[in-house]
């Protein structure tokens, strides 16, 4: 047993406050309060966000419309106002919540799995692969109209991730090789995307593609909400099932193996899970950066590093955050819409700098 393994074995049974890499455990009442408060805040945020826009709509209007469409009574709103709530604003707001939750969860898992506080859901090149798939469908017309932009983005994301897995496995499969393979795939697919746009797209296509690449929730419907919600639910269950394993990774791969973790199997399961979830979200909403980078750190400051508590809180924080970011993006320059990724970058860059300073001070 090497030094890391002996250290892990000694600290595994120690009180959380005595472990060098794990903050003190948050009590159960505080955890329940965080979960309950986060859920109530999310519900209130969705209800209020739907009311914000050119058409005057109140929170009771939102609740009555939702209740009517779910079969609980009838709404007295006009068909136009009912359509604005149910067909336009509600799907967009709910998809923003799902994307925020999913990206935040992926960021949490990636940072723990790779032991890198600056890792985010796009470190595996999934975003650049999705961008290439979308561009190939929209600009080159691959699929002859039978393949949608979202389907093309999803296929491109999976191909990019497959390339990362192949490269990392060929290079030895260590954590740093996974990250380097992701960077290589990101640069390759980004270059191909730029080449296709510059050589084959007209001005209108270029504008539409670039707007989507920066992240956009406009024009989404209930089908996207249902698909992304289902993928998020499955992937969140998988991640929660591996919560203790992710805790073990805080001590390093060798230490995790000494604690009984099948490192190779766990890594491939969690990498595939996060890649699948990221691919689904990017195919529906484009590349929305900084959510998966910053929100895990904010949630970790509240709950500590125990993933059974951290993952739900991170999901709720990401959902609330992106609901309000999307609301700001569609209203701040009304009637013009700002890409969601631009707003998250404006907010996320200062937070990213704070993370850099924090990691430097603790290194």
Image (tube, rainbow, N blue to C red):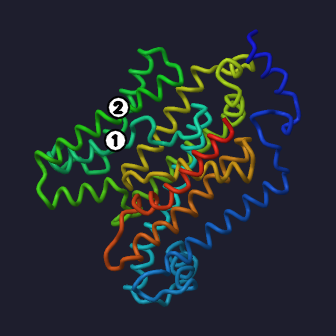
Identify the residue under disc 2.
185
Q: Vertical placement of 183 versus 4: above or below?
A: below
**SS for tag 2?**
helix
In the image, 245 versus 16, the foreground residue is: 16
* Residue 30 appears left or right of 237: right
Q: Vertical placement of 119 versus 72: above or below?
A: above
In the image, 174 versus 228, the foreground residue is: 174
* Residue 281 appears left or right of 42: left
Q: Quadrant of residue 239?
A: top right
- Mark 1 Cα within 10 Å, few/some/many (few <14, many 20+)? many
In the image, 277 versus 210, the foreground residue is: 210
Position of residue 99 measured from the top left corner of the image (x, y, whole percent) = 49, 55
Number of disc labels = 2
Position of residue 169 measured from the top left corner of the image (x, y, whole percent) = 44, 17
* Residue 102 appears left or right of 317: left
Of callouts 1 and 2, which one flags the residue occurring earlier in the amino acid sequence?
A: 1
Q: Are marks 1 and 2 in contact (CB under 8 Å)?
A: yes
Which quarter of the rendered picture does the C terminus lie within?
top right
**SS for tag 1?**
helix
Residue at 57% over, 57% down: 318
Position of residue 354 measured from the top left corner of the image (x, y, whole percent) = 59, 51
Q: Which numbered tag is attached to residue 357?
A: none
Identify the residue under disc 1.
128
Position of residue 97 measured from the top left corner of the image (x, y, whole percent) = 52, 61
In the image, 130 versus 94, the foreground residue is: 130
Which quarter of the rendered picture does the N terminus lie within?
top right
- Mark 2 Cα within 10 Å, few/some/many (few <14, many 20+)? many
For marks 1 and 2, give the CA distance: 8 Å
């Amino acid at each position: 047993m090497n030094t890391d393994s002996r250290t892990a074995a000694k600290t595994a049974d120690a009180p959380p406050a005595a472990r060098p890499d794990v903050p003190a455990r948050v009590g159960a009442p505080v955890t329940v309060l965080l979960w309950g408060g986060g859920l109530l805040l999310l519900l209130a945020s969705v209800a209020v966000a739907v009311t914000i826009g050119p058409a005057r709509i109140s929170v009771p209007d939102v609740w009555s419309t939702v209740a009517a469409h779910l079969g609980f009574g009838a709404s007295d709103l006009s068909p136009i106002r009912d359509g604005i709530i149910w067909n336009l604003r509600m799907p967009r707001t709910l998809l923003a919540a799902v994307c925020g939750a999913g990206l935040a969860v992926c960021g949490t898992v990636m940072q723990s799995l790779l032991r890198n506080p600056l890792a985010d859901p796009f470190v595996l090149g999934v975003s650049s692969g999705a961008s290439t798939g979308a561009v190939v469908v929209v600009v080159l017309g691959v699929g002859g109209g039978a393949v949608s932009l979202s389907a093309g983005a999803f296929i491109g994301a999976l191909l990019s991730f497959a390339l990362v897995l192949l490269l990392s496995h060929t290079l030895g499969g260590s954590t740093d090789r996974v990250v380097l393979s992701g960077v290589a795939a990101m640069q390759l697919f980004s270059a191909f995307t730029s080449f296709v746009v510059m050589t084959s797209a007209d001005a209108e296509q270029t504008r539409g593609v670039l707007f989507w690449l920066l992240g956009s929730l406009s024009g989404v419907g209930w089908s996207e909400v249902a698909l992304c919600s289902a993928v998020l639910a499955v992937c969140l269950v998988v991640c929660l099932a591996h919560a203790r394993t992710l805790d073990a990774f805080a001590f390093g791969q060798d230490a995790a193996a000494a604690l009984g973790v099948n490192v190779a199997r766990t890594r491939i399961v969690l990498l595939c899970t996060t890649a699948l979830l990221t691919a689904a979200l990017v195919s529906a909403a484009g590349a929305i950066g900084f959510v998966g980078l910053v929100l895990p750190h904010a949630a970790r400051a509240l709950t500590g590093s125990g993933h059974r508590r951290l993952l739900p809180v991170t999901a709720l924080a990401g959902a609330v955050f992106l609901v309000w970011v999307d609301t700001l993006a569609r209203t701040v320059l009304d009637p013009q819409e700002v890409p969601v990724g631009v707003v998250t970058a404006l907010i996320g860059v200062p937070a990213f700098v704070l993370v850099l300073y924090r990691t430097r001070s603790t290194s």
